[in-house]
Amino acid sequence: MADLNRSKWVLKQTGFDLDQVVLNGSKYILGNGYMGYRGTLEEFRAPQLTGTLVAGLYDKVGEGWREPVNAPNGLFIQIHCNGKLLGVLDAKVEHHVQSLDLRTASHRRETTFVTEEGSRIEFIAERFLSLERKHLLAMEFTVQAEQDALLVIKTGIDTDIWDINGPHLQSFQNSETPGGIISVESKTHELGIPLCVAEALDFNGLEVESITEGSIRHITLKVHAGRVYRFAKFVTIFTGNDGVPSVTESAATACAAARSLGYQSLHSAHMTAWGEFWKEADVEVEGDDEAQFALRYSLYHLLAVAPPPDKNLSIPARGLSGQVYKGAIFWDTEMFMVPFFLSALPEIAKNLLMYRYHTLDGARRKAREYGFEGAFYAWESQENGDDACTHFNVSDVFTGRPIRTHFRDKQIHISAAVAYAFWKYYTQTGDSQIFQEGGAEVIFECARFFESYAYYKVPKQRYELLDVVGPDEYHERVSNNAYTNRMVLETFRIAQDVVNLLEKDNPEFLSQLIERLGFEKMRAELPRLQKELFITKPDDDTGIIEQFDGYNELEDMLLPELKKRLINPNEYLGGGNGLATTTQILKQADVVLMLSLFGDEYSKEVKSRNWYYYEPRTEHGSSLSACAYGLVACEIGETERAYPFFLQTATVDLTGKSKQYVGSLYIGGTHPAANGGAWMVAIKGFAGLRISREGLSLDPKLPRQWQKLSFPIRWHRQRFVVSITPQEITIVADSKNSREAQWMLGGKQVVCAPGAILAHRI
Amino acid sequence: MADLNRSKWVLKQTGFDLDQVVLNGSKYILGNGYMGYRGTLEEFRAPQLTGTLVAGLYDKVGEGWREPVNAPNGLFIQIHCNGKLLGVLDAKVEHHVQSLDLRTASHRRETTFVTEEGSRIEFIAERFLSLERKHLLAMEFTVQAEQDALLVIKTGIDTDIWDINGPHLQSFQNSETPGGIISVESKTHELGIPLCVAEALDFNGLEVESITEGSIRHITLKVHAGRVYRFAKFVTIFTGNDGVPSVTESAATACAAARSLGYQSLHSAHMTAWGEFWKEADVEVEGDDEAQFALRYSLYHLLAVAPPPDKNLSIPARGLSGQVYKGAIFWDTEMFMVPFFLSALPEIAKNLLMYRYHTLDGARRKAREYGFEGAFYAWESQENGDDACTHFNVSDVFTGRPIRTHFRDKQIHISAAVAYAFWKYYTQTGDSQIFQEGGAEVIFECARFFESYAYYKVPKQRYELLDVVGPDEYHERVSNNAYTNRMVLETFRIAQDVVNLLEKDNPEFLSQLIERLGFEKMRAELPRLQKELFITKPDDDTGIIEQFDGYNELEDMLLPELKKRLINPNEYLGGGNGLATTTQILKQADVVLMLSLFGDEYSKEVKSRNWYYYEPRTEHGSSLSACAYGLVACEIGETERAYPFFLQTATVDLTGKSKQYVGSLYIGGTHPAANGGAWMVAIKGFAGLRISREGLSLDPKLPRQWQKLSFPIRWHRQRFVVSITPQEITIVADSKNSREAQWMLGGKQVVCAPGAILAHRI
């Protein structure tokens, strides 16, 4: 990417490229957890996929998919000179730079237009979504002309909204306060939830002629050659989910408050907040600028979508980058994002988990819908926990007909992911309170779901899990998927451990909960379920763990051979008649994902054999695949094989290699699970960090060029900063730490006291 | 069919129609159980689909399907006049008649050709496949010319063989005995089984000039105007399966013997044998000539393919009409043909059952192949019991790719059909000896297969049968298919009954068998399996029995709506992406088939509701569908609704409505299961015959126009002739019967002594 000019902190692109407009919408995105704002330019409108996504606000219109609501665009600006629009799509552009500063989560564009009269006009705009004030988007922009000129600046709130299955907003009402704050209130179709966008403009004392038409201001401005005209724009958003009596009043009030504080002050507070964020999260790599930037960029995306503490929110699979994937929360969160948050910002990890508690009733409804008990979590979960996933997820390119897929009804491992993440939270934070705050109920209900799903094979005296879809979605309706069975066993084990733990901690709570849930019989079954659930063993001869019953009998081939059979490049490889369905080709890490989670149970030999068997048969058709292969490659001592997978998962939103459209359907957006995967390969793979209730351990296998890897880590309310060089491990314990911690370094147990600095030569 | 001029016994067609050539090959077929000879004309060759199929002889070449072997055509004749071929495809035809006499199983063609010189030459040929001498095909033909002419008659053995996946024969060796018997010996590819066709010609003392080239004679004949020249042809076939030291010697010897007996004598013996056959089997209908003929024609087809007693053979789904459906034996035999044979020719029914005993090891191999115990019978069984069915049975019309189907691995109800038929044999014949001759072993192994296939659902305390294909092949991989579960329960019940019966009859045999099979544990499980196997009950509100778990949730529509969605008329409706797969449209009777077998367990109301629910959702895309709907319609008192289904199943091989080709693949042929279905609707439906171990009962519901229905029936070594008129039932007991029988007539029990005539007014 010759045009990509990046420092360690700044993503920057010089020159305007029409082909990059859609991609850059995700690449240059801003977010503060409450909302996301796509990296489009100020003059863009719906066709360029402008987006202001408010987390947790969904709507459904007619038979369309239920999806997030895109708010009216409060940061809209179009500058006209002599009646001609100065925009990158319309005018001559002499110079253009778009940049995103990861450290401050600030977006900037600088464009020099050449008017039809041949005169230069420079337009610079900087914006941020305040991390300190979650409802606020703020912008400062300047205009400077080479010659005197008469400009008309159209700004305000653009209600030309990009929707996939919209329009979602109706009953638009404009208003303007005496103080010049304009606002647009509207409400969603399905639930009638109000949403208001308010905007205030700060002219910096300049006298301008401004007329408001609807929600757009038309500002007439005579500019003098060479003089810089500076404006600030403050946009606030409130919705019916915010628990305020009037969204318009709240938005207007917040807007007025922001304007009175001024852009610089707000920006400064925002940057401070991001600084704190980075302090808890940043990972430093020396000796490999590409890796450093990609990793930081990954963490930026995770931080930008981390939900605020007071909201029952989790992170959608495409973050806040649009209505893609219905803005739904998948297993991505628990399996691929939670590990990072647990280590950097455990209170956010807890938020994410509590979302599953708040949506437990949805999971119960889904279990009942399919005739099961307990909690069957939505494959695509929205704010209510109901499943947004349909039974027909893809189209047959040959007939145009929808293809029945079994993501929704058979991907049962989702409930195991939820239970697993709760346990990991407890393991790393030591916070057993979470079980009494909802965690135990979630875990018990997940275990019960699996008990009701399992079948017993009498002649073999074992439980089996039949007719499921594992991580590899190209093979639907398989039985005894190794990943699924192992995760379900883990769920039973966790349920048992939580029972044991609560028996000690709070037996009264436990007995009340068990009684309320009717969990007594199930509790008695737990030992037998753990003992008798079938777990696929590595083959005695080959060491290969069969991905599911009968996988070995499928047609064996490597990926290029399958590709040769394609008639249409867009044909779906899975489903009933997909090309991969009858072969051993898998979409994404499945057995290898299992090995990345339960590596301690398998020899290096088994891990190695499975890695080398499955990797050439894996399409890596999901952004969740690379990190598992990276992690296991590290475990088998193959750092150089892990490295490309690390880069793949860390750069997924940078390279633009991922597909943006299927037909006319936009499927682009950010990939926070891959971002979390990048963190995992760096920290769990290259640094070899392992975390248990007893302590932490490191077993570094840095890539050759890495001279240093440093990162903070949180464990049991303690905080450490780890630095690894090829020669040495250094651990700095925060002086505020309350107690000692056990570290295992190079096979040696070391005690790390508060404020201590440990150094260990490798 | 304006051109179809049929009496009660003779199928006849006047005029030659090129479009009917392929269809007539099946329609005018001859058979004697050992072999079948397609209803082609004497001058026809491979492109016209000539066929001499030897039962039980299969071959596989390369990657092609394993299929029956088509022998060289010994009945080939081509007459040339002045160097021009006189054949229906080549010469001017003034008059042409093709006929098949069902009573004598004799085929006749009469054709008057007009030569290029404008002179008429008449060619008449009559042929039969001797029922008395199974290896013999015999023919008499005459030639008569209006003017003196020089004819060259080419006859002998045509080795231009029609094959679907051939050529199957190699190493052809011609020979000619001093007595003028020519023969062709060859052998199959796969197993090297020899096959010989021998031919002798009887010139009736005429001096002719005959030169043999290869296996074809070139006979030069100067014919005089008006004189009739009569020839007889004798063809014999022996194969390596016949247990003779030399197939050529056996064929030549048999051929010479036939020639010395002469055509008339052989034909007379053949006709006597068929007379006996008809005596045991014929069903007479008065007042409905169409029904009478169609029913007789159906019985003709069943008799023509009934395997000889000394062969381990059963009846392929397409009889002996070609290589279609791989010449394989399906559940068609047990469920749709055995009932007729049990009632008319129980010794043939026993043959059919013993075939399953002889192929038990194949069923055991298949069970092991899929990880089960016991006997999983082949979906498409050939002589060795191995499954000729592939995992890919149909093609995707949109991509040309094979579609994965689950007929082979999931249609487990085949093993239940086998056990069921053994029990029905015992019920009707009283011959419990069959259990010691192999029946018990087959039944125990089928039961064991189902035990190993079943899963136990612990919370519901029941066994379930998961992931199966029921009779409706458009819905694959379903769970708890009502038909399958009920048939499997019946298998467990039968196994239990056989255990009980043998405990009384021959406890030593039983204990040895149980020990040899290791069946002790399984035997102990039988009561629990019977008690706990899940059986779908009719819905409390609607009375509908759900075809399988989740059927009710599928998209509901009637057949015409589905047809509207077709893009290609040939697209497959089932499989992974088929149009019917996600809807309630079924291929063929499924719940209704179950009701036709276990009607006594359900109220008339339930049967009626299910009939009316499922019928408009049934494509009747299988020839096995109509008879079940006919039977249940009779049970609910809807004779007039049953009648069209009776006609449909009885005329399946007459109307030519069934498909002959899919693409270039021939799929035509005869439908013996539908033929058996016609018998069932007539006797079990309209006459309302029920058979138990205790006796027989009748509950007639004749179609309005039927003045009389008469048929023989065998029960426990006794024989009766039943006649039913709208007013009266008459039962004539054979005077050779050995004991009294219980008949239930109109709810009244009546005892029928040997030689008695019972009359019961309705």
Image (cartoon, coloured by chain):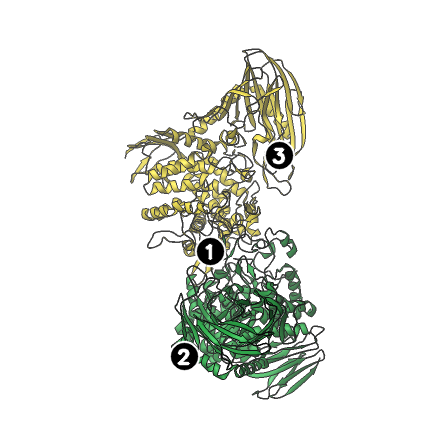
Chain colours: A green, B yellow
C-alpha separation, residue under disc 2 versus residue under disc 3: 106 Å
> Left or right of A249: which side holds A653?
right
Chain assignment, label 2 = A
- Residue A106 x/y as whole percent: 57, 76
Chain assignment, label 3 = B
In the image, B386 versus A741, the foreground residue is A741
Q: Secondary structure at mark 3?
A: helix
- Whether pointer 2 and pointer 3 mark residues with C-beta atoms closer than 8 Å, the reply is no
Mark 3: few/some/many CA within 10 Å (<14, 14-19, 20+): some
Q: Which residue is mark 2?
A: A178
Q: Same chain, marks 2 and 1? A: no
> Left or right of B234: which side holds A238?
left
C-alpha separation, residue under disc 1 versus residue under disc 3: 45 Å
Q: Secondary structure at mark 1?
A: helix
Figure quadrant of the N terminus of chain B: top left
Q: Which residue is mark 1?
A: B524
- Residue A14 x/y as whole percent: 64, 70
The image quarter in which residue A485 lies: bottom right
- Residue A652 x/y as whole percent: 61, 67
The image quarter in which residue B218 lies: top right
The mark lying in front, picked from 2 and 1, is: 2
Residue A170 visible in the displayed image: yes
Q: Which residue is mark 3?
A: B240
Q: Vertical placement of B732 versus B109: above or below?
A: below
Q: Amino acid at mark 2?
A: Pro
Chain assignment, label 1 = B
